């Protein structure tokens, strides 16, 4: 989900059916996970694998996983 935007880390969330770019602060990293210290809140919908077609404000649709 994370990508570089200049010297910062960023990701896309989904708000109101649109992609929103958020700058985040990254903490500890492993080969598969990164701790996010700030920039998103618990419950925010994050686009895990954005393609190069996703931009700020792009319309997106999604399906929430079933529990």
Image (cartoon, grey):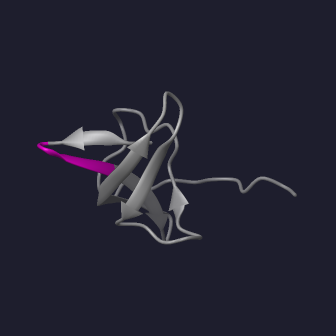
Q: Position of residue 3 (x, y in %)?
A: 31, 39
Q: Residue at x 37, y 43 (%)?
A: 54
Q: Position of residue 52 (x, y in %)?
A: 34, 32
Q: Quadrant of the C terminus?
A: bottom right
Is 49 located above or below residue 58 in the figure? above
> Please, which residue is most extreme toward the left here?
6
| Span highlighted in magenta in the image | 6-10
Q: Residue at x 53, y 67 (%)?
A: 44
Q: Residue at x 31, y 58 (%)?
A: 24
Q: Quadrant of the N terminus?
A: top left
Q: Position of residue 19 (x, y in %)?
A: 40, 57
Residue 22's quadrant in the figure? bottom left
Residue 7 falls inside the magenta stretch: yes
Residue 5's quadrant in the figure? top left
- For the stretch drawn in magenta, the main secondary structure is strand
Is 60 located above or below residue 44 in the figure? above
Q: Position of residue 46 (x, y in %)?
A: 51, 55
Residue 31 falls inside the magenta stretch: no
Q: Is residue 55 left or right of residue 49?
A: left
> Please, which residue is most extreme toward the front here?
28
Q: Nearer the viewer, residue 1 or 30?
A: 30
Q: Nearer the viewer, residue 64 or 4?
A: 4
Residue 2's quadrant in the figure? top left
Q: Nearer the viewer, residue 51 or 31?
A: 31
> Please, which residue is most extreme toward the right here?
67
Q: Nearer the viewer, residue 7 or 29?
A: 29
Is 58 located above or below residue 42 in the figure? above
How many numbered discs sit on the rendered protein?
0
């Amino acid at each position: 989900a994370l990508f570089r935007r200049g010297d910062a880390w960023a990701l896309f969330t989904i708000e109101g059916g649109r992609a929103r770019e958020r700058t985040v602060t990254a903490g500890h990293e492993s080969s598969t996970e990164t701790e996010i210290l700030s920039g998103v809140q618990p419950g925010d919908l994050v686009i895990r694998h954005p393609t190069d077609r996703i931009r700020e404000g792009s319309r997106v649709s999604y399906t929430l996983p079933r529990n």
